[in-house]
Amino acid sequence: MFTHSEAVGHMGRGWKGRGGWQQAEVPSAGDAAAWFGGRLPEGWFTGDPEVTVDREEIVVVGELPAPTGEYADDAARAAAEDGRISRFREETRDERIEIARQAEHRYQRKVAWGARIGGTEVRFTTLSAPVMTRLRQPERLVLDTLVDAGVARSRSEALAWSVRLVGEHAESWLAELREALTKVDDLRSKGPDLG
């Protein structure tokens, strides 16, 4: 499954020089799910991995076979699932590093990995990208309230929590927006070449 999160086409950020940051072209990662599907060794996952792409990172999460056996309770089953994921992480480390190196060269983005079994999902070495924003006092007060209430340890963590909350509750709207942006990209690529 491929989740397309490139909100404004195939643009990334790059250093412009004295003037500061500017948008810079990065390669399209529209074929990343297919590339990983063809590149990953047979038997790593029970099906095609979920591949999520944004401007900075590609995250590849695959489903592992469930451990077989009888478990006393859900906690024991979760521990077995976590153990199976840890084993996968260790046994595939060198090969995942090589595949990530190739993908990073091809797509100009960092690659992170994850595995899922049943209700247990673990992501390995995901990127945490800094985002600069300006907030007025009412927005800062919202963040400070979340910190004061113990929901978050810092304004940065409170902002990340808020973004996740909006993402969970606005997923269908965000999906429509992503689809519309993909159509804009397609139309833009069919336009006249002015260069």
Image (tube, grey):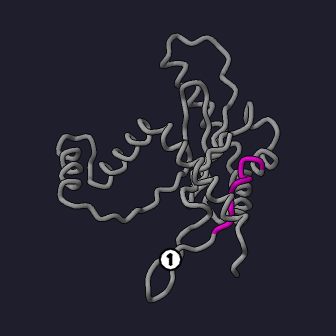
Q: Is residue 184 above or below residue 21?
A: above
* Main secondary structure of the magenta stretch: loop
Q: Secondary structure beneath disc 1?
A: strand
Q: In which quarter of the image is residue 14?
A: bottom right
**Closer-to-camera residue (10/39):** 10
Left or right of residue 49, residue 135 in this image: left
Region rendered in magenta: 26-34
Q: Is residue 183 above or below residue 118?
A: below
Is residue 32 rendered magenta in the image? yes
Q: Is residue 16 above or below residue 119?
A: below
Residue most toward the front? 192
Q: Please rate how many residues cluster around mark 1, counting C-alpha atoms within 10 Å: few if below 14, some from 14 to 19, many from 20.
A: few
Residue 8, x across and y down, in percent: 55, 60
**Closer-to-camera residue (117/108):** 108
Residue 128, x across and y down, in percent: 46, 56
Q: In which quarter of the image is residue 99?
A: bottom right
Residue 16, x across and y down, in percent: 51, 83
Left or right of residue 99, residue 137 in this image: left
Q: In this view, does 120 lie above or below 54?
A: above
Residue 32, x across and y down, in percent: 71, 52
**Closer-to-camera residue (54/103):** 54
| Residue at 73% from the left image edge and 35% from the top image edge | 45
| Residue at 50% from the left image edge and 37% from the top image edge | 172
Q: In which quarter of the image is residue 130?
A: bottom left
Residue carrying label 1: 22
Is residue 154 rendered magenta in the image? no
Which quadrant of the rendered structure holds the N terminus? top right
Q: Which amino acid does label 1 sit on?
A: Gln
| Residue at 18% from the left image edge and 52% from the top image edge | 141
Which quadrant of the rendered structure holds the C terminus? bottom right
**Closer-to-camera residue (47/64):** 47
